[in-house]
Structure formats: C-alpha cells, structure tokens
Amino acid sequence: MSLQVVSRSTVDTQMLGEQVGRLLDAGDLVCLYGELGSGKTVLTKGIARGLGVAYERAVRSPSFVLMQRYQGRVPIYHADLYRLDRLTDIADIGLREFLGGEGVAVIEWANKLEAWLPAERLEISIAHQTEETRLITITPQGARYRQLLKQWQSQTMSCGETCGPGGDNVEMASA
Ligand SMILES: Nc1ncnc2c1ncn2[C@@H]1O[C@H](COP(=O)(O)OP(=O)(O)O)[C@@H](O)[C@H]1O
Ligand SMILES: [Mg+2]
C-alpha cells in the first residue's frame, strides 16, 4: 500500500511533514527520496516542528556535516547523504548508532544507503510536477509504519478542510 498526495506549495509540504512528525516516536526511521530541490528539507522542517523542535527554522540540508541533531519531544537525527558517493563514507558517518535508538532518524537521499538501512521504515518520495506542485508518495514498510499511515489518514480525513494536509489543496489517492 502506498498513498499519494499532491502538495501545491511549500507550506503544504511542511504541513504534511508536521502531521507525520506528530505521529513519530523514538526509534522511527523516515527515508526521503527525490531529486535536488524537490522538497526533502522542507518536509524535514515540518517533521521537526511536529516533533516539537522549537527552532525548526534552523533545519537545513546538513550537506557538509552529513548529520544534524535537533532536540524535540525526542531527538531528531537529520542526515543528508547527497554528497555521499563512496561506500567507505558510510562507515564514517556512524549512522547505525542513530537507528532504532532513542531518537527519530530522517534521511535525505536514503537511496544512497538503501541496502544498509533497516527494511522497516517510512518511505516518502517527492517528485516535481510544476514549479510549485509536488507529487508525494508515502510508502510504509512494516507494520509499525502501516499503522502510522492509517492514523495519519484517519486524522486528515476526519478533520477535513480545516486541518487536512493543506485542506482542499491536497488530493489524496491510493496507489
Ligand atoms: N510544493 C512544494 N513543496 C516543497 N517545496 C516547494 C514546493 N513548491 C516550491 N518549493 C520550493 O522548492 C525548494 C525545495 O527545497 P529543499 O527542501 O531544500 O529540496 P531538497 O531538500 O529536496 O533538495 C524550496 O525552495 C521550496 O520553497
Ligand atoms: Mg535537502
């Protein structure tokens, strides 16, 4: 099962992230896919806000340090693997200790580490449609994340336009 959402603005994408962030908990893993400028960092800002990070404006692509930690309700470990191109680098970043631990891990360009990451994860792919619209595909891998997605769906559907993912700006379709 995967779910598709059309985001029509930066704010829409951030709001979607915030809704997901509220449902995340310690040990969770979110893998983000999509080309440069698709909105992975924008989504991560929303996730951070949903996790209660006070200064989510500080959330930016950690392209030079590979990993940043923000303190929210639980810690959030934000990695950006864009510049990672040698397998040897993977050992260097010590990602393993951030997985399944006391925090939430959010990984941009997760495709670069695909085989090394736990199979159970929430996958979110973002694709450009136009300058301002994005097709966002959410795929839960494993029971924990299927449950999370169900929870998200029931919340966004029951509250309709007032607090849905951008209200009527977002179309939902099962894929
Ligand atoms: N619907 C949208 N969702 C997310 N970002 C959008 C959207 N429309 C325009 N943008 C812009 O696209 C850019 C996405 O940048 P960023 O999140 O850093 O991408 P990535 O981390 O995937 O490289 C931002 O400048 C953002 O304002
Ligand atoms: Mg980024």
Image (tube, helix red, strand yellow):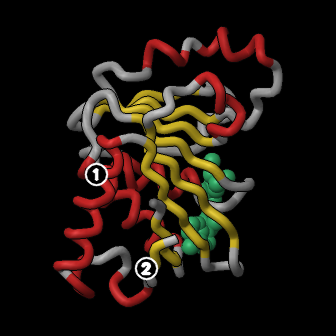
- Using the image, tell me which numbered label, if any, was put on residue 148: 1
Name the image quarter holding residue 160. bottom left
Residue where numbered disc 2 is placed: 172
What kind of residue is marked 2? Answer: Met
User: On the rendered structure, is 83 left or right of 162?
Assistant: right
Residue in the picture at 53% in, 81% down: 8
Q: Quadrant of ligand 1?
A: bottom right
* In the image, farthest residue toward the right: 86
Residue depicted at 68% across the width and 39% down the height: 111
User: Quarter holding the N terminus?
Assistant: bottom left
Q: Is residue 161 left or right of residue 133?
A: left
Which residue appears at 56% of the width and 32% of the height? 79
Between 116 and 101, the one nearer to me in the picture: 116
Q: Position of residue 18 (x, y in %)?
A: 33, 58
Name the spot of residue 139 as percent of width and height, x first: 48, 54
Using a 10 Å C-alpha cutoff, classify the residue at mark 2 as few (fewer than 14 neighbours), some (14 to 19) or many (20 or more): some
Q: Residues within 10 Å of mark 1 (few under 14, many from 20)?
A: some
Sequence-earlier tag: 1 or 2: 1
Q: Amino acid at mark 1?
A: Leu
Answer above or below: position of 85 versus 158.
above
Q: Position of residue 14 (x, y in %)?
A: 43, 63
Q: Is residue 23 visible?
A: yes
Residue 109 percent location from the top left of the image: 66, 41
Q: Visible in this render: residue 58?
A: no
130 in relation to 81, above or below: below
